[in-house]
Image (tube, rainbow, N blue to C red):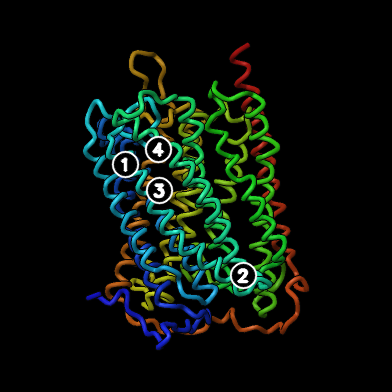
Amino acid sequence: MAIGLLDAPYGEDGFRTCEVTGLRIHRSAEVPVKMFGLTAVVALIVGGIAALLVALTRWEAVGILQPTAFYKYLSLHAWNLLIFWMVFMEVAILYVGGPMVLGRKLPAPRLAKVGWAVMVASALLIDYAIWTTTYPNQEPLLTSYAPLKSSALFYLGVDTFILGTVVAALPFFACIWQEKSEHPDRTLPLVTFGAFVTGIIAVEALLGGLITYVPTFLWRIGLVGHIDAAWYRQMYWIIGHGTQQINLAAMVTVWYFMTHLTAGAEVASEKVSRGAFILYLFFINMGAAHHLMADPGVSASWKMWNTSYAMYGAVLASLIHAFAIPAGLEAGRRKRGLGGDGWFGWLKTAPWHDPGFSATALSIVLFGFLGGITGVLMGQMQLNTMRHNTLAVPGHFHGTVAVGTTLAFMGLVYYVIRLIFRKEWVFDRLARLQPYLYGFAMSIAAMAMMEAGILYGVPRRDPITTSIPGTQFSFSAASPMLAVLGIAASVAVVAGAIFVLVAVGSLLFGKEARMRVPVPLALTGGDAPVHRFSMRGTLAMCLFFLVVFALFYGMDWMWLSRLWMFGG
């Protein structure tokens, strides 16, 4: 390329050795990682612009969009940030966790490029279909619920985007197949194993998407006469919620990778962490049931099974990771002589000035308190009644996806710029500030949405900020909370723009990276096993988390009991 973004020094065999990680990286894997990563950043820009307009509309003092335009931009926001930004990054993560970590060539690299091309063309088609939607077609939002009809081009774009993603994932699975065929007795590295589990969850979600959207496309063009709305809702949430579970598994994989790379973390127990990933395989998508709690098409017993016993398997897996990752960080830093004094010296001495580490650390903490706790509460069949179809629902997934996953991916991109593109960060001070500014602003926005939904009943999708037309019901009491949402979301968008500025500026104008081994990689504790080192700081933090969890759980049941009083 003219700007040299895909150029790097390779040996005659097509490999180069990363001076920091020691990974042997082949050209066939590196080029697709760059392609998918750059495309993800472009989707982030488009979705971020739409997000700003949506937030300013929710802020009634501004109210920038009319209802018809609101739904258009809300759809663009959802598809570009919840789908395109995430999925393009996740395919890149598969290639990093697979061929790069294993030191292998990427099988069928042309297939990866075909998948990328189909995904890009499909994303453009979906955005075009949303942008040009006119009555009687409806803006699809994220759910595109039948029997409301959206543009036929939209459904076609979704189908081809899913197919393109499947094609792009095939080289990763081929790489795993080759590795296990050649080394059947060798255990996959934990990061590769996490990427593999992510890939399996993705296949389940994508197959659900085809089951949903192919018949819907045929219905839209007149080849199928009827789409049952209850069937559509149940099938849709295989992909609608499944894509967010891909985000979760990919995010956890990035946590393991980035805490080791930036701060010297080790895995406290390989078997336990792998077991948690396996629990995700069986139980993680059970969380989709919370979208169907008010649906008459499924039985009460199905709802209870999915929101209690089945969901606990996924919750257990997340709690295991919530302990294992900071425990590995604490023990790894103590092993390297970086534990400092007392219970939390290992945190005080951590590289908080490094945006790769700070983004990862904030992702872990904020996801746990905002997304994790609220996800369990919302997944409870009884407690779900207070949140269903209110602004608390997007408040929750902004706590998971917009805060947790996006921060983790931002941290990874910072290091992809240095390790893959071999460029130094430009605007270094802005890069150091950006994770904090984005993390805290988006956290406030997420909490404002949750409070507006739970305490005031503000609806999930409507641009209504004062009253429901034709009724005397008023949301005016929620106005201060919606103003907080508008301000915090605007700051978060500015922080997102800083990330894009640093990322793109580094690629175009950054100096060649001065590759050096970070201090945390220098062992001072010898070959002593990691469990020999104290993890008491992590234990204290996890106990604090469980106390907060219990307080919120009890508070929600108290609120629910008061809600029941209104029906007495």
Which circle marks residue 189 in the picture? 2
58 lies above or below 296: below
- Give the residue type at disc 1: Leu
Residue 162, numbered circle: 3
Q: Is residue 386 left or right of residue 449?
A: right
Alpha carbon separation for disc pair 2 and 4: 36 Å
Q: For marks 1 and 3, give the CA distance.
A: 10 Å
Q: Which of marks 1 and 2 is in front?
A: 1
Between discs 3 and 2, the one toward the N terminus: 3
Q: Which of marks 2 and 4 is in front?
A: 4
Q: Name the residue under label 1.
A: 156
Residue drawn at (62%, 50%), measured in percent from left and top?
Answer: 281
Inter-mark Cα distance, 4 to 3: 10 Å
Closer to the N terminus: mark 2 or mark 4? 2
Mark 1 and mark 2 in contact? Answer it, CB < 8 Å: no
Tag 4 residue: 213
Please tell me whether mark 2 sits on a helix, a strand or a loop: loop
Tag 4 secondary structure:
helix
Q: What residue type is labelled 3?
A: Ile
User: Crowding near pointer 4: few (<14 within 10 Å), some, many (20+)?
Assistant: many
Residue 399 coordinates in the image, percent (x, y): 50, 46
Position above or below: 216 against 210: above
* Image location (x, y in percent) of residue 27: 40, 77
Contact? badges 4 and 3 (CB < 8 Å): yes
Callout 1 touching callout 3 (CB < 8 Å)? no
